[in-house]
Image (cartoon, helix red, strand yellow):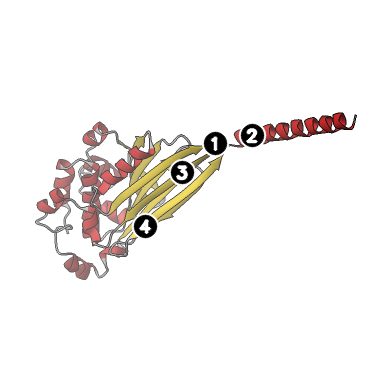
């Protein structure tokens, strides 16, 4: 299947929740294997980054339009397909395509200052009613300890439409892949769910966990938490307690001696 409809979308729908899904569904429609990762990295102070990455193998790269007329679709064509001006204006940084083994990755990263900002960024990826939703990130401080938590839901039970939006569907006459999904699967001889690998990872102080929801599969409830203790504060507290106990013992001994005298 030609990718020209998706080139149209990539040129005219530059926001992340449209660019990456358009690229993704276009490659799936062409029968390519696509890896997609969403990574949340939270630092000690609650700030961090959200990274969205799409990995294409050599077959997927070859399906890209030959924009630079090199004779083959490659990483240079991938860089030209994604318009970064709108993304940059909204705080995203899009790196150049990078080859890691036989996979070429395109990564977009956006920083956040608080856990609440991180949840908002994650929700924007597919929209509040999309396949990735209900995100909650928290950082709570208590005496001598800090608690971190993450929760969210990955609902891909609706298939590839979980990554689409109204603008993309309208441009493709209501079909998320430009043609009926069943027809694509019959033509390619495999389910669309086997062509997409989605990983969602969270890295926070004291915890690191990932989930791999399956396209068309059951809803995945994601959650993890950790508690990081502050050793210096706890040590000072212990020393203070010991000092109080020692003072109490000294006073008790002196009182007994005075009573005996």
Q: Which residue is mark 4?
A: 221
Taking 184 as reference, is 45 above or below it?
above
Q: Which residue is mark 2?
A: 237
Picture disc at residue 143:
1
Front-most of 30 and 172?
172
Q: Return the x and y of residue 6 as percentages of the image width and height.
A: 17, 50
Taking 13 as reference, is 243 above or below it?
above
Q: Mark 4 to mark 2: distance in Å? A: 38 Å
Front-most of 138 and 200?
138
- Tag 2 and tag 1, C-beta contact below 8 Å: yes
**Residue 261 visible to an observer of this rendering:** yes
* Tag nearer the camera, 1 or 4: 1
Q: Which residue is mark 3?
A: 148
227 sits left or right of 22 in the view: right
In primary-sequence order, the first of circles 4 and 2 is 4
Image quadrant occupied by the C terminus: top right
Q: Secondary structure at mark 2?
A: helix
Q: Secondary structure at mark 1?
A: loop
205 sits left or right of 120 in the view: right
* Residue 229 location, quadrant: top right
- Tag 1 and tag 4, C-beta contact below 8 Å: no
Q: Residues within 10 Å of mark 1 (few under 14, many from 20)?
A: few
Q: Mark 3 to mark 1: distance in Å? A: 14 Å
Instruction: Determine the residue positioned at 18% across, 64% down.
Output: 181
């Amino acid at each position: 299947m030609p990718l020209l409809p998706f080139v149209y979308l990539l040129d005219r729908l530059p926001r992340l929740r449209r660019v990456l899904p358009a690229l993704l569904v276009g490659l799936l429609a062409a029968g390519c294997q696509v890896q997609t990762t969403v990574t949340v990295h939270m630092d000690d102070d609650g700030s961090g980054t959200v990274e969205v990455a799409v990995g294409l193998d050599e077959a997927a790269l070859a399906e890209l339009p030959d924009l630079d007329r090199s004779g083959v679709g490659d990483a240079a064509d991938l860089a030209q397909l994604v318009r970064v001006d709108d993304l940059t204006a909204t705080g995203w940084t899009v790196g150049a395509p990078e080859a890691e083994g036989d996979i070429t990755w395109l990564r977009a990263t956006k920083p956040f200052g608080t856990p609440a900002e991180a949840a908002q960024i994650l929700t924007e990826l597919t929209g509040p009613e999309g396949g990735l939703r209900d995100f909650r990130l928290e950082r709570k401080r208590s005496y001598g300890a800090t608690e971190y938590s993450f929760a969210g839901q990955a609902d891909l039970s609706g298939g590839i439409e979980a990554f689409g939006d109204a603008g993309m569907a309208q441009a493709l006459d209501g079909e998320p892949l430009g043609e009926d999904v069943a027809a694509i699967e019959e033509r390619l001889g495999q389910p669309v769910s086997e062509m997409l690998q989605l990983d969602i990872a969270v890295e926070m102080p004291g915890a690191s966990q990932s989930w791999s929801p399956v396209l068309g599969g059951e809803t995945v409830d994601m959650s993890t938490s950790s508690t990081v203790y502050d050793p210096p504060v706890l040590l000072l507290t212990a020393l203070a307690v010991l000092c109080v106990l020692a003072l109490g013992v000294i006073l008790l001994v002196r009182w007994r001696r005075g009573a005996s005298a």
